[in-house]
Image (cartoon, rainbow, N blue to C red):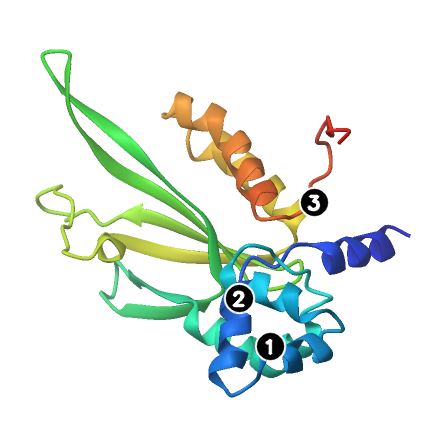
C-alpha cells in the first residue's frame, strides 16, 4: 500500500522543469496543439507551461519525458573531483540530475575575538536523478599538507574534494543528512541544528512529499 501511495504521489508531483521540457519539444518542431494532444490537455494549458505560469505533473508530461527526458538529464550535470592523498591520483566525476540542495559550512576566523572572515570547510550537495532517487555529494575543502592553507580556484567547484553517496530514496536522504548534521558538524552547532530544517524545506519546495510534516492546509 505504501509503495502504491508513493507512486501516486510521484505522478501528482509538479514537474519543476516543465517549461524547459515544453521548449525542447517546441524547438524540435512541435506545435502547442500537438503537445496538448500528446499530453491529453488543452492548448491554453500548454501555453501556460511554455510561459512558466503553470507547472505540469510528471504524469501529464510522461509522453514528452519519454522522448526528451534524456536531454534534460544531459543538460543538467556537474563535474566533481578528488585527489587520493597517498597516491596523488585524481578522480573526476560527472553527476547528472538537478541540484536541489547545496549548503556550505564555514569556519569563522577571528582575530582578537573579532570575526574576520568565514572559510568554507564542508559542503553538502544533493542531486535529484528522477523518481525517488537522490545522490549526495560530500565535499571537504582542499588543504595543502605542508602549509595548511586552503586551495583557491577561480571556479568555486574546484576548491572541494568530493565523494559520492547514494543513490538514496527521499527517506534515506533525510536520515543520512540528519546523521551528517550530528556526526560531521559537531564543531558547527548552528549548522548542525539548522541543517535538518534546511533539507526538509528544500525537498518540500521542490514538490517532494515528506513523512512527519505537520500540515496546516488552507481552506480556499
Q: Is residue 44 left or right of residue 137?
A: right
Determine which quarter of the picture holds residue 37: bottom right
Q: Which mark is residue 158?
A: none
Verify CB contact (< 8 Å) between mark 1 and mark 2: yes
Q: Position of residue 152 (x, y in %)?
A: 13, 50
Q: Nearer the viewer, mark 2 or mark 3?
A: 2
Instruction: Say which label, 1 or 3, has the lower sequence index.
Output: 1
- Crowd class of label 1 (few under 14; some 14 to 19; many from 20; radius 10 Å): many
Identify the secondary structure beneath mark 3: loop
Q: Position of residue 91 (x, y in %)?
A: 32, 69
Identify the secondary structure beneath mark 1: helix
Residue 123 drawn above or below residue 16: above
Q: Is residue 73 left or right of residue 131?
A: left
Residue designated by label 3: 209
Verify CB contact (< 8 Å) between mark 2 and mark 3: no
- Crowd class of label 3 (few under 14; some 14 to 19; many from 20; radius 10 Å): some
Residue designated by label 2: 50
The residue positioned 14% from the left and 56% from the top of the image is 154
Q: Nearer the viewer, mark 1 or mark 3?
A: 1
Name the quarter where the C terminus is drawn: top right
Residue 123 drawn above or below residue 97: above
The residue positioned 61% from the left and 64% from the top of the image is 130
Looking at the image, the residue that sits furthest to the front is: 44
Q: Position of residue 216 (x, y in %)?
A: 73, 26
Instruction: Say which label, 1 or 2, has the lower sequence index.
Output: 1
Q: Is residue 132 left or right of residue 111?
A: right
- Label 1 and label 2: CA atoms lie apart by 9 Å
Residue designated by label 1: 32
Looking at the image, the residue that sits furthest to the bottom is: 29
Q: Position of residue 96 (x, y in %)?
A: 46, 68
Q: Which of 187/74 is in front? A: 74
Amino acid at each position: 500500500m505504501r509503495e502504491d501511495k508513493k507512486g501516486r504521489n510521484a505522478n501528482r508531483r509538479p514537474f519543476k522543469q516543465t517549461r524547459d521540457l515544453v521548449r525542447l519539444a517546441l524547438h524540435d518542431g512541435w506545435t502547442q496543439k500537438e503537445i496538448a494532444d500528446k499530453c491529453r490537455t488543452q492548448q491554453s494549458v500548454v501555453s501556460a507551461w511554455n510561459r512558466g505560469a503553470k507547472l505540469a505533473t510528471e504524469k501529464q508530461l510522461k509522453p514528452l519525458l519519454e522522448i526528451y527526458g534524456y536531454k534534460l538529464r544531459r543538460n543538467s550535470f556537474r563535474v566533481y573531483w578528488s585527489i587520493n592523498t597517498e597516491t596523488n591520483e585524481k578522480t573526476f566525476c560527472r553527476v547528472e540530475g538537478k541540484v536541489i540542495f547545496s549548503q556550505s559550512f564555514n569556519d569563522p576566523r577571528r582575530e582578537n575575538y573579532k570575526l574576520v572572515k568565514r572559510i568554507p570547510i564542508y559542503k553538502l550537495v544533493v542531486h535529484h536523478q528522477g523518481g525517488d532517487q537522490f545522490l549526495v555529494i560530500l565535499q571537504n575543502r582542499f588543504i595543502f599538507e605542508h602549509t595548511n592553507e586552503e586551495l583557491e580556484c577561480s571556479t568555486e567547484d574546484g576548491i572541494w574534494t568530493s565523494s559520492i553517496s547514494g543513490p538514496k530514496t527521499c527517506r534515506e536522504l533525510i536520515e543520512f543528512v540528519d546523521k551528517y548534521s550530528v556526526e560531521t558538524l559537531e564543531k558547527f552547532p548552528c549548522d548542525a541544528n539548522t541543517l535538518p530544517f534546511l533539507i526538509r524545506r528544500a525537498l518540500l519546495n521542490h514538490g517532494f512529499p515528506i513523512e512527519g510534516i505537520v500540515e496546516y492546509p488552507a481552506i480556499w
